[in-house]
Image (cartoon, rainbow, N blue to C red):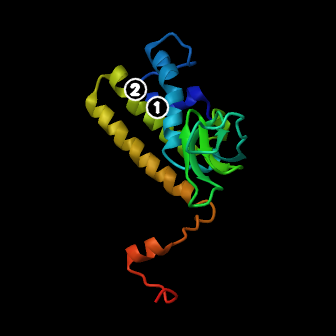
Amino acid sequence: MASEVSICNLGLTKIGEEQILSLTEDSKAGRLCNLHYPHLRDTVLRSHLWNFAIKRVALAVNTTAPVYDFDNAFALPSDLIRILDTNLLNESEWKIENNNLIADDSAVSIRYVARITDTNEFDILFVEALACRIAAELAQPLADNLTLVDAMFQLYEKKLRDARSADSQEGTPDNITADAWLDARLGYISPYNA
């Protein structure tokens, strides 16, 4: 299975660099991997609705309510990368402020992309996309080659498209419900509104 070091090494070999033994290794590549790995992992996690990283949770209401506009504040999970949806009605307003979701509702559940740090949970295509993102980030400071930087970003974008495509084919597609505004926008006239 993949480890943080093996993922970094996949990226390093793509730009022709020597592999590292650990993220705490006292080498330029080791220090750069240690510096960039957590940020790049979270960046790639945020870039797609990765099936392996999706969680659902009922949020706990805070004892301190917002000062105005909303009735309740709910503590967000510490591993939150990106909220996908909530159980709130379409008309319900909500916002994210200071690591809280604020809304008028008294109970809120969310589905979200979580910060997954256990590399054993990563999808293999996510690993490949992350390795390419690492290669793109480290190509300039290690190889000092802007052409290689561009090539690695292009490879990252291709691997990310491939991973998204495969990942999105697992499960039933989300149901998109049309409303009167969307119907009007698409030029559809409902027989019930005629």
Q: Are marks 2 and 1 in contact (CB under 8 Å)?
A: yes
Instruction: Determine whether, in the image, residue 140 is placed left or right of residue 63.
Output: left
Per the image, label 1 sits on a secondary structure element best described as helix
Rendered residue at 62%/65% (across/down): 172
Mark 2 crowdedness (10 Å alpha carbons): few <14, some 14-19, many ≥20: many
Given residues 97 and 17, the one toward you in this image is 97
According to the picture, the residue beneath numbered tag 1 turns out to be 11
Answer left or right for 176 relative to 152.
Answer: right
The vertical placement of 161 against 9, above or below, is below
SS at badge 2: helix
Residue type at numbered disc 1? Gly
Q: Which mark is residue 69?
A: none
Q: Name the residue at the top extreme.
A: 26
User: Of discs 2 and 1, which sits in the foreground?
Assistant: 2
Instruction: List the residue tagged with mark 2.
Output: 138
Residue 23: give x, y in percent of width and height: 56, 19
Q: Residue at x 49, y 89 (%)?
A: 191
Q: Amino acid at mark 2?
A: Leu
User: Quick one: label 2 or label 1, which is nearer the N terminus?
Assistant: 1
Location of residue 114 with respect to 85 vertically, above or below: above
Comparing 92 with 113, the one in front is 92
Q: From the top left corner, tell me how far across and down residue 33 is, in percent.
A: 49, 22
Give me the residue at 45% from left, 27% from top: 12
Percent position (x, y) of residue 43? 49, 36
Decide if residue 124 is on the left or right side of residue 36.
right
